[in-house]
Image (cartoon, rainbow, N blue to C red):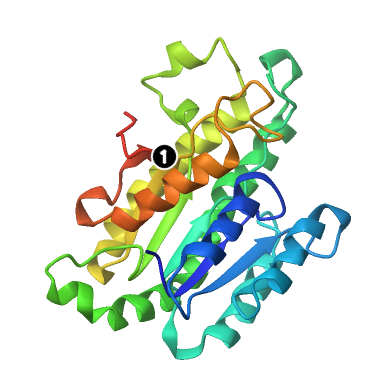
Amino acid sequence: MLAGNILVTGTNRGIGLELVKQLAQNTAEGAHIYACCREAEGTRAEALRALPTQYPGKITVIKLDMSDEDSISAAVHAVSRQIGADGLNLLINNAAVNKPASPAPLSATGKEHMMEVYETNVAGPFILAKMFLPLLQRAAERGSAAKEMGNTMSCRRSAIINISTLISSIEKCPETFPVAQMYPYRTSKAALNMLTRCQAEDFKMHNILVTAIHPGWVRTDMGGEEAPLTTQDSVHGMLNLMSSLSNKDSGKLLDWQGNIIPW
């Protein structure tokens, strides 16, 4: 079971909203979820704003635009003030955009799409993790119980989970490309995988686990109605997986059931 201070981005709908719901239901006593979204006061976040009432004292909604460094900085400061000395145990980078609309063929894709998607899907998680690193280190230092058991890394202690995708796999591109070209989304998530590998190498000295997870093909606005997985099943699988991650999983790309996806 996950515990401590947990922050999730992109939580106003789909997988992000379901992550907040299931974390509120299934985390250890004393856990707190920081649910971040771009338009926290807008109509698209009504379902998210209702959750703190359903789970009193367990959820804080934070405004966060992953494409805006000032917004990221403001969110980090807001969370830091609330967390205090405990540190941040788990950062889930779920927020992502896909432009132009699927299937996003080459003919419809311009430079502006590539840059906008990269800014949110790669630069955003990079800056957020960089700014939260002191709080992640603080949580890692406090997690002495895991260290005593000889397994220094876990999502209960200190971890970054980057939500990636099967279509980020360069090896599997010949299989997946005909279904959806999605140049900006594919290339941004491949870059997120490299960010995951770099962070895993960089942060292992601090005992901070960094893993990328593919949530499956999920029935969301982005996934479409043909997708076989519900958000409930995908998130249930991912949270089970996160609860079991350890040193051996840092720097990997796994699917929601724990299978390794080739780069």
Identify residue for label 1: 256
Rendered position, 218 above or below 239: above
* Residue appearing at x 26%, y 68% in the figure: 207
* Figure check: 116 above or below 6: above
In the image, residue 74 sits, relative to residue 211, either above or below, namely below
Q: Residues within 10 Å of mark 1 (few under 14, many from 20)?
A: many
Residue type, label 1? Trp
Residue 112 screen position, x and y as percent: 74, 35
Q: Is residue 247 left or right of residue 221?
A: left
* x and y, in percent, of residue 185 in the image: 60, 32
Query: Where, quadrant-wise, is the N terminus in this rendering?
Result: bottom left
Where the C terminus falls, by quadrant?
top left
Q: Is residue 199 visible?
A: no
Q: Residue at x 41, y 71 (%)?
A: 3
Where residue 189 sits in the image (x, y, percent)? 51, 37
**Viewer-proximal residue among 229 and 150:** 229
Residue toward you, 254 or 117: 254
Q: Residue at x 63, y 65 (%)?
A: 35
Q: Is residue 213 above or below residue 58?
A: above
Q: Is 18 placed left or right of 51 in the picture?
A: left
Q: Nearer the viewer, residue 123 or 177?
A: 177
* Residue farthest right in this picture: 43
Residue 113 seen anywhere in this rendered image of the structure: yes
Circle 1 — which element? loop
How many numbered marks does the figure carry? 1
In the displayed structure, does residue 212 sit left or right of residue 64?
Answer: left
